[in-house]
Amino acid sequence: MSNIKKFRIKSFKKRNVILKLDKVSFKFGRKIILDNLNLELGAGQILGLLGPNGVGKSTIFNIIIGLLSPNFGSVLIDSQRINKFPIYQRTILFKIGFVPQNGGYFHDLTVSENLRAVAEITIENVSYREEKINSLISKFELDSIRDIKADFLSGGQKKKLVIALALLSDPKILLLDEPFAALDVMTIKILQEIIVDLQSLNNISIILCDHQARDLLACVDTAAIIHNGKVIAEGTPNNLLQNIDAKKAYFGDSFRIS
């Protein structure tokens, strides 16, 4: 597959950090999931998270959206600590959108009904609400299936729908949990292009995690390797592949982007 990312934003200065996890720790029972983890997302950046199963990538997302509370450390957006804010306020006030790996839609509602159900919560202005729904249906080429129940959509169509649902609240930060899982090659390429367009056209800062390392590295500016509850390596895809710690913990010696 050709490189989706035609350009990479290579530097994000401190003053442009939009999201920061500062010394975040989280335990599940006696098991330490995150251990004094530090992570930053620059404004307008696409950041990928990589690591073995159970390393804490989804836990990071759940802490950012407010589903889990860290045992220690801070979640900051634009330098404001948001640990005490509930999920709905993080969505509305701090403009966080989340696309889960599975689900994220109403199974027995049509595409348009799904969008309308969420829009009624996130968009007060009725005329703008309809405009936004129609705009997203057009953007993600869902018009031909707008009256089809979500349960009957293909995997790629479901993923497009869930991303559209996350965009209803006009997020400035979008989290995508394993967006390429169980999708065919062409659908993955379409989603990669959508992700890059959200950055370049909508100025959305994005974090995504996935086990499909090549697919993830094709559309991010930088990536971070999570191991033993910490970020052990971070950089552009090409630089990361040369990192000794990244090779030892995740890539091995034979991995190549293409």
Image (cartoon, rainbow, N blue to C red):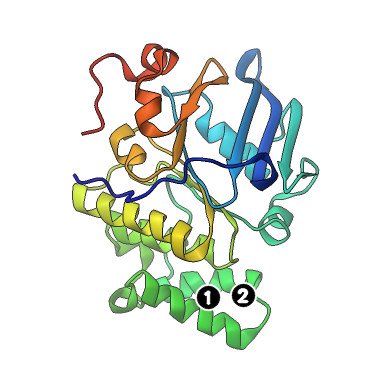
Residue contact between numbered discs 1 and 2, judged by CB atoms under 8 Å: yes
Amino acid type, mark 1? Arg
Query: For residue 116, which numbered disc appears in the image?
Result: 1
Please provide percent x and percent y for residue 179.
38, 46
Q: Quadrant of the C terminus?
A: top left
Is residue 110 visible to the viewer in this orientation of the structure?
Answer: no
Q: Which sits in the foreground, 112 or 247?
A: 247
Q: Residue at x 75, y 49 (%)?
A: 86
**Left or right of residue 37, residue 55 in this image:** left
- Secondary structure at badge 2 equals helix
Q: Residue at x 45, y 81 (%)?
A: 134
Please provide percent x and percent y for residue 16.
65, 47
Note whether 157 is above or below 216 in the view shown.
below
Note whether 117 is above or below 13 in the view shown.
below
**Left or right of residue 227, residue 123 in this image:** right
**Left or right of residue 111, residue 215 in this image:** left
Q: Quadrant of the N terminus?
A: top left
- How many other residues sit within 10 Å of disc 2, few (<14), some (14-19) or many (≥20)? some
- Secondary structure at badge 1 equals helix
- How many other residues sit within 10 Å of disc 1, few (<14), some (14-19) or many (≥20)? many
Is residue 35 visible to the viewer in this orientation of the structure?
Answer: yes
Please provide percent x and percent y for residue 164.
46, 65
Query: For residue 120, which numbered disc appears in the image?
Result: 2
Note whether 172 is above or below 61 in the view shown.
below
**Left or right of residue 127, residue 199 in this image:** left
Q: Residue at x 45, y 78 (%)?
A: 135
